[in-house]
Amino acid sequence: MSPALRRQDIRNIAIIAHVDHGKTTLVDRLLQQTGTFRSNERVLERVMDSNDLERERGITILAKNTSVHYDGVKINIVDTPGHADFGGEVERVLGMVDGALLLVDAAEGPLPQTRFVLKKSLEFGHHPIVVINKVDRPDARPHQVLDEVFQLMLNLGATDEQLDFPHLYASAKLGWAVREMEETPGDIMPLLRMILERVPGPPGDMDGPLQLQIANLDYNDYVGRMAIGRVMRGRLARGMEIALLKLDGRIEPHKVTKVEVFEALRRVEVDEALAGEIVALAGLPDIQIGETLADPRHPEALTPIRIEEPTLSMDFMVNDSPFAGREGRFVTSRHLRERLTKEALANVALRVEETDSTDTLRVSGRGELHLAIVAETMRREGYEFQLSRPRVIMRRGPAGQPLEPIEYLVLDLEEAYMGRVMEILGVRRAELANMGGAGTGRVRLEFTVPARGLLGFRREFLTETRGTGIMSHVFHEYGPYRGEVPDRHRGALVVKEPGVTVTFALFNLEDRGTLFHGPGVDVYEGMIVGEHVRDNDLVVNPCKRKHLTNMRASTSDDTLRLKPPRLMSLEDCIEFLADDELVEVAPRTVRLRKRQRNASDRKRTDKAAAEATVP
Ligand SMILES: Nc1nc2c(ncn2[C@@H]2O[C@H](COP(=O)(O)OP(=O)(O)OP(=O)(O)O)[C@@H](O)[C@H]2O)c(=O)[nH]1
Ligand SMILES: [Mg+2]
């Protein structure tokens, strides 16, 4: 495109990186040092991580827009999540920007998600600016990490121009960036200057017919659904009649009722936005990501952004446990269906499908966390439902052979634990792909491993490494099925009959396994209250009181000291699940249960299954 058609008063960039490499912290500094906040204004750390789950977990889940002004130029910034499960968020916003800041932790170096987001950005033709961040870390190795990024670009097939990338060294935390390590740190301005120099302005044909693709959605209580995208061509004004080009080819006439632009942490209503600007607009209630807004006389659709397919699915079903409806406000299959369908509109990497049962919906996503966050969000809104064990989504190869999702797994752990971890991964069908750092006390191990093999691995890995191991993984490819992966190796402690748990009974169960609940908890037949030490399930009665006749002073409930129960978060429960189990998710409680609540029914089903598999 001729430079004349690019706007010079705007830059649109995304900040991309592996999880925790400092994206949101960098946005804080950009906002602070460009005078967005008054000097006496107390601002939250990581201000862009604005939703509850993001703040609780300290991670970004949704991509979000903001902007700063520097040297007469407006820089629209999209902060993106780094966790691999939210890769769909990154994919969908990259088309709205003309460049990216690739942050890489100066100690950790490129990790799986660095590769994924960089690959996507290169595919969009960006020339990313590499920011080696956290150079203040005592274990920082900035020059080496820069070399590793270069290697990575080379491996990803970057063009010569892309390989000639500009770079900076930064400490987002301390608020500075420098071009060379020898320079004395000052402020973050060198980064802003580099953005103006190296990121091209957006295409700015303001007189052509309107064209705008929706990259993101948001809700506003007053005006309903807001759609976010960049004006690719022409101008978008309030009150304008437009053609909405749906993904299925239909064209709908609509009127834009509101146009807003991003100014720091606020959105400001404007009469009109010109080509190049990123806007949020209202007036199109059923709009979806990927659809194009166009001039009715020139209805030309932009190619929808292709998002990677989901690899994991879980059933969301109506809660049919004896405690159903105790806490939830939204409990019917209609509630679930409506909420999940709405979620899938904005959560582009999510798929929601019907199943044989009207009470069950199959929800597919990019990983356990992706699905768990959906469930957690719904739970907080007052929904109540049950979840099945996650299953990987298989495919067929050209010759009909089964293919399964393979993940790329990177582990960083103390050398002493290496043998045991390799053993566990061997059973889970992992293959070692790379190994480094030997002799330094810590090793970095890289594997390809079936996604099936990673279900429930995190807990085991953390236990084996006494909590010191670091792991991350990202979807790698669909590859040949690698054979059986054994199930969870411990059984469950399953409640025999309904009641309220008591200390005496729990105390006597402690030898049998790890308990998930303390005393005074309502339980029902078939509910799971702990993990058995052995590999089979054990039916137990945690509500059994001692016989008063053989009471001895030493076993009075008051003197019994219970070990603290293992409190199971929603994700812990999902990790724990076997095929014949469910998680019951309600606004205040999560519980584990057997699908078949009655022990003899379970035996009968097991027997039938065993007979069915006898040749
Ligand atoms: N030492 C050091 N720590 C940093 C720096 N930048 C960020 N951190 C810390 O790294 C952690 C993660 O920072 P975030 O800004 O949330 O990282 P992120 O890349 O936005 O993480 P996700 O959005 O979840 O992918 C926080 O504890 C920050 O304080 C830095 O320059 N130096
Ligand atoms: Mg973040």
Image (tube, rainbow, N blue to C red):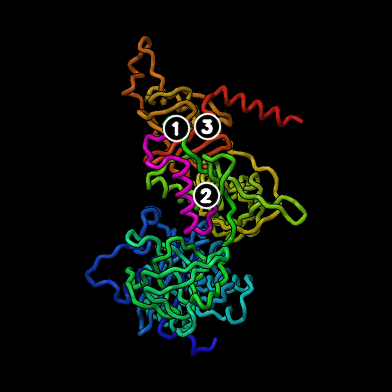
- Amino acid identity at mark 3: Lys
Magenta span covers which residues?
324-351
Q: Is residue 333 magenta?
A: yes
Q: Which mark, residue 368?
A: 2
Residue 559 sits in quarter: top left
Residue underneath mark 3: 594
Could you tell me which quadrant the N terminus lies in? bottom right
Label 3 secondary element: strand
Residue 423 shows up from this direction:
yes
Residue underneath mark 1: 515
Q: Along the line of sight, which residue is nearer the eye, 395 or 233?
A: 233
Residue 315 sits in quarter: top right
Please name the residue shown 40% across and 64% down the image. Answer: 226
Residue most toward the top?
549
Label 1 secondary element: strand
Cα–Cα gap, marks 2 and 1: 24 Å
